[in-house]
Image (tube, grey):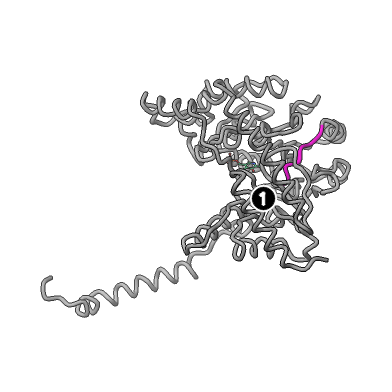
Amino acid sequence: MTGWTPAMMWARRGPRLLLLHLLAFRDNNELMKFAQRMFRLGTETAFEVLARARQLESQGRRMVHLQIGEPDFNTPDHIVEAAIKALREGWHHYSPSAGLLPLRQAIAEDVSATRGIAVDPDQVVVTPGGKPIIFFTLLALVEAGDEVIYPNPGFPIYESMIRFTGGTPVPAPLREELDFRMDVDEVLRLISNRTKMIILNSPNNPTGSVLSPSDLERLAAGVSRTGVTLFSDEIYRRIVYEGDAPSIASVRNLQGRTVILDGFSKTYAMTGWRLGYGVFPSAALAAHITRLMVNSNSCTAAFTQLAGIAALKGDQTPCQKMVETFHTRRDRVVQLLNQIPGVSCRAPRGAFYVFPNVSLFGRKSDELAGMLLNEAGVAVLSGAAFGQYGEGFLRLSYATSIELLEEGIGKMADALGKLNRS
Ligand SMILES: Cc1ncc(COP(=O)(O)O)c(C=O)c1O
């Protein structure tokens, strides 16, 4: 090849490269027709805001991250040690698709004890994070045209997955007047002969609301003569500040048609480990979910499952301390937000989010969140990213230090202070 100049190389290879590029371009734009279902798929804005905040940071801008949906603590040591031990012992291979039996037994015992119901390990399926339980349950139960009632504002994946699986999402508004709890009477009025499922999420993301025992009793009474399945997302169940977050599965007669989603991400600060589970009302439904696992993930990583056993059976003190820290921060954040003229914020009872009302500024939540990110250097999420009933609100996560919370809310106050209010 000696003696070849770049110009000679290009003359020799250029036309072929150009043709390949043209073909690739045509493939992407004309030949590769994406399946229609892809246009029904939503997303989680939190990941997009994180990417934009990182981009601004790479340009030297200081950012305060209040968009994060995960504990800022590390996973407790004894759980990490259990995973390391498992790896050293050779847990490197495929494992049963429904999850390792000892973990499913530990989950069944834990759920039986905490919800006061009988659970058999055959009803439990372990997945990489809690999220697949939403997808798999909807895939297994919802037919095209079936209606699914879901909390709005709510975790955006519900609406995305309902649409993707062919169902019709029916939003149940969470209103500030009710401390963002579902209005049970309204939910019961939304039930039609097409309703297949009602999704509950308590404590709720993004509002931190917790359903009361009376809400659950009234809902149970209302659905008792329907064939509706209840899907109870309890991923924040252990992060509560006033009393407990009761489960609909504990309410008489409902265990037989309630799916519980829970997992290790939030309770044990294990978001990156990807370890969650579903508890299904029958072994038959669990078997269908397991087949979805076989077809998608094969199994959840074995060493993370052994860490999960250590989490459930080991010392719970680190989790309790984490919740106490969140409690202190919640009080401070609510106090600071309520001091900003034009902002009002209810004290959430669970999870690690606040959902302040910013409607007095007369701007769209998206616009306010964008302005705070780009101009004030505070990453928060627009309430509208959680559904149309989130318009007029912002979501802030207090899974970060008090110092950063004070800095971020201080910057927010300065930026909002420059806007007109109605
Ligand atoms: C309400 C809700 N459900 C489920 C999940 C999914 O949790 P995981 O990270 O275990 O998949 C989240 C995560 O943010 C959530 O907020």
Q: Which residues are magenta?
A: 207-212
Q: Quadrant of residue 71?
A: top right
Image point (49%, 70%), residue name: 29
Was residue 211 drawn as part of the magenta stretch in this picture?
Answer: yes
Please say whether residue 290 is visible from this viewpoint: no
**Quarter of image, ligand 1:** top right
In the figure, is residue 14 to the left or right of 180?
A: left
Mark 1 lies on residue? 396
Asked if residue 392 is positioned above or below residue 282 in the image, the reply reads: below
Q: Nearer the viewer, residue 108 or 367?
A: 367
**Frontmost residue, 253 versus 216:** 216
How packed mark 1 is, by other alpha carbons closer than 10 Å (few <14, some 14-19, many 20 or more), is many
Local SS, label 1: strand
Q: Residue furthest left?
A: 2
In the image, residue 26 sits, relative to residue 168, either above or below, namely below
Q: Amino acid at mark 1?
A: Leu
